[in-house]
Image (cartoon, rainbow, N blue to C red):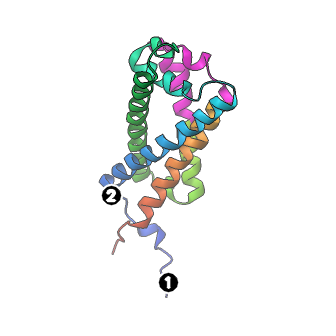
Amino acid sequence: MTDVRTHDTRRVDLARALKHGAIGGVIAGLVFPMFEMAMAALQGDSPLAPLRMIGGIALGDQALDPGFSILVAGGAGIGVHMMLSIVYGVVFGAAAAVVRWIISSAATAALAGAVLGTLLWVVNFYVVAPIFGWTWFPEMTDPLVQFVAHAGFFGVPLGLYVAWALKRTAPRVT
């Protein structure tokens, strides 16, 4: 006989949730810039412009200058972006361990990830960026593209991976 409580009897170990949150952050952190770079190219900008903008967080607005080394600006952009993606993934993993319904289904996990991605966009672009003088984020980007990028190409992959990873190896309560 099948135990109908199987789904409800799985534990989410916080350490596993944090680990898989970090891995999910890396995955989402790779998917997101690919979308951003493709959209920049489709809009007639350099596909490396998103990396320059993110690199400007560490290097200042000089990173936006086309004469500034793309290796330096892009490298800084990749480093900053991956670090933030891992941090945000760990936060999502911790939330999934504490608020179990976040990973109750793929749809719920995708939605929770999309909500996180949207919150990250709004807070980072319209609260944090102005405080630190990173005015190029809201000025140089299309809000619709940023919404889709953050919700759909960061949040959704993060949510789906974390839900999948935590459900596939979760120990059963006896």
Residue 3 x %, y %: 47, 80
Residues 19 and 140: in front is: 140
Identity of the residue drawn at 66% across and 26% down: 143
Judge whether 56 appears above or below 33 on screen. Answer: above
In the rendered image, the vertical position of residue 158 relative to residue 141, given as above or below: below
Mark 1 / mark 2, whichever is N-terminal: 1
Q: Residue at x 33, y 75 (%)?
A: 174
**Residue 2, label in figure:** 1
Prevailing SS of the magenta stretch = helix
- Dot 2, how many residues are within 10 Å of its Cα: few (below 14), some (14-19), or many (20+)? some
Q: What range is drawn magenta here?
A: 118-144
Question: Which residue matches tag 2?
Answer: 13
Asked whether 13 falls inside the magenta stretch, the response is no
* Mark 1 neighbour density, 10 Å: few (under 14) some (14–19) many (20 or more): few
Position of residue 28 measured from the top left corner of the image (x, y, whole percent): 49, 44
Q: Give the x, y percent position of residue 110.
A: 57, 51
Q: Amino acid at mark 2?
A: Asp
Q: Amino acid at mark 1?
A: Thr
User: On the image, which quarter does residue 126 sit in?
Assistant: top right
Question: For the view shown, which residue lies furthest in the bottom direction?
Answer: 1
| Vertical position of residue 5 compared to residue 102: above or below | below
How many numbered marks are there? 2
